[in-house]
Amino acid sequence: MDEEDCCMKKEAQSSFQSENLDSSTSFMHESDGLEGAEKHGDLGDMTFYMTNYIKDAMKMMFIMRSHHMLTDVILEVESELFYAHKVILAAASPYFKAMFTGGLKESEMSRVKLQGVCPTTMARLMYFMYTGQIRVTENTVCPLLSAATMFQVSNVIDACCVFLERQLDPTNAIGIANFAEQHGCQNLYQKANQFIVQHFSQICQEEEFLQLSAIQLISLVRKDELNVQEEREVYNAVLKWVKYNEEARGSKMEHILHAVRCQYLTPNFLREQMKNCDVLKKVPACREYLAQIFKDLTLHKKPVVKERTPNTRRVIYIAGGFLRHSLDILEGYNVDEKTWAQHTKLIVPRSGLGGAFLKGMFYAVGGRNNTPDSRYDSDWVDRYNPVTDQWRACSPMSVPRNRVGVAVMDGLLYAVGGSAGAEYHNSVECYDPDHDTWTNVKPMHIKRLGVGAAVVNRLLYAIGGFDGTNRLNSVECYHPENDEWTMVSSMQCSRSGAGVASLGQYIYVVGGYDGTRQLNSVERYDTEKDTWEHVSNVTIARSALSVTVLDGKLYAMGGYDGEHFLNIVEIYDPAKDTWEKGVPMTSGRSGHASAVSYHQCPIHCDHLDHNMSLEKPPS
């Protein structure tokens, strides 16, 4: 070992580390402070990596700067002077590198005056350049980011962006997005806009929202992924924005209104707005536009714009069911992760219940509590909040309804048919979640137990079922405008207990029971042509299954095949007319309810839970 090697070994008693960059041997010397070394061939050739060298060197440079030792430039910021080393500034900042090495006059100057930055911020940046440390606070982040952007100090830019991203809140998200755009922080700008879209219902209540330009507002409300429970939230937000400065903004209402998906407002809401809204009265073109939409809705025309698709967690919820007795379980299937999870149990075990999502809440409607201790049909309605993972009781229906059909139309929950003991219902009632009230509508022509319910273009369809004597193939259609039921084309096969769901212009009817056997046949109804046709069968004949729709596909889950309660999940792709197996449920069951949740934002549910009493089981 020569003299240089001996000297290196003596000086390496401080912390250092080897990096095994190739197949060379690496070994440890913990007792003498050597964290690692890389051996090349034999002990006569080793490479050492000193972990503290750069840190210690920069610490010494910082001390030297503090004592004006070997500094070769003075930065003048307002009335303060900063002594520095050009090489450090150039290494930390492309701005200073260009200044001192690019042939500019500043490269020969020993004193340079800087504009556009305050002394306090410059001191923080200088401290970072010499130490690699930067403290960011709510008060310093904006001037720091502006200065770091000007001097192109990318590490400080990144630190400020991370800080602002973690500070995102409904009160500041729009301001952060604007600030990020001004300073070219594209990643932060995207994160802030994602936050705005995700929390629109809260953000539109804030002052920043009212300061948006018309162009910014239109760009925002046009987004497909805007996370709202109903389009009325978007309409009301736009109206609030206009009213904030009606004199200047009233003339822009027509253009902005076309960005709102008014085809998904309810006719009752449109009627009320056209009658009472002062802003609309001053802009006849807006009233005419809404009047045409109102006409199209009441004529049940297919919307020309698609529904919004929030980029939120999609979960299929399954509640209750029967397996030797009525179940109280609630499970959620995360479609993206392909996993099942348990959630808070139903207040009362139930099978034969209906289920639907409405304004961010999962509703469990009716059913039967069939347990060893009790057996009764239920008029109960419970509401589950996915955000809080809690159930609350709602106002009960006018009568118990077991094996009830449930669907959502115009922001109301419809309960169709069902039975109370030996009494079969043709009655129908609808629930208003804003007022927690049930209202009876016109009864169906036929009593129906185990009926399927679906909505297409604001028309409610009641499909099949059992009238107490026969399984039915008949179908009725409810028109909310005149509160009337009309008969439409019948199915090709009589069935009750089928899984029913709408997808596009079609209503799919899966499986069921025809009075002698369980069915594996599937047929669909074309609401535009009033015709039925068969599509591919499910693999296992079953009844009392549930069917729901997600991403343009049908999910047929569980059911009873005549001997066994099934946990099978099959997924239908209408484009290919094929079924494939999905992730099975955690256990077999029949008579359960299912529905899909797209939206999960706490503010949506607060007004519904307000004034609602805690649950207690029926006496």
Image: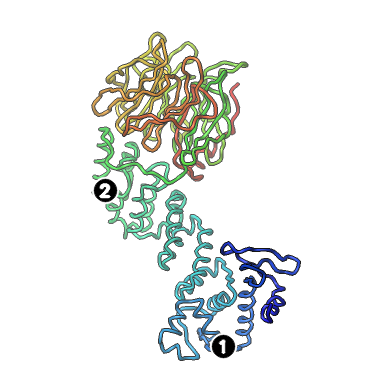
Determine whether, in the image, residue 91 is placed left or right of residue 478.
right
Number of the label disc, if any, that sits on residue 206: none
Residue 164 image point, x, y percent:
51, 62
Give the CA distance from mark 2 to mark 1.
Answer: 69 Å
Earlier in the chain: of badge 2 and badge 1, it is 1
Q: On the rendered structure, is 117 left or right of 549?
A: right
Q: Quadrant of the N terminus?
A: bottom right
Q: Residue 316's spot in the image, x, y percent? A: 47, 34
Looking at the rendered image, the disc whose residue lies closer to the viewer, 2 or 1, is 1
Label pair 2/1, CB-CB below 8 angstroms:
no
Residue nearer the viewer, 510 or 412: 510
Label 1 sits on residue: 71
Q: Nearer the viewer, residue 33 or 102?
A: 33
User: Callout 2: helix, strand or loop?
Assistant: helix
Q: Quadrant of residue 424?
A: top left
Residue at 42% over, 26% down: 406
Horizontally, residue 246 falls left or right of residue 292, namely right
Q: Is residue 361 above or below residue 61?
A: above
Task: Name the residue beneath numbered marker 2.
Answer: 286
Write the residue at 46% across / 58% down.
173
The spot of residue 187 in percent (x, y) is 44, 60
Residue at 49% from the left image edge and 25% from the top image edge: 592
User: Quick check: 428 above or below 471?
Assistant: below
Residue 217's spot in the image, x, y percent?
36, 55
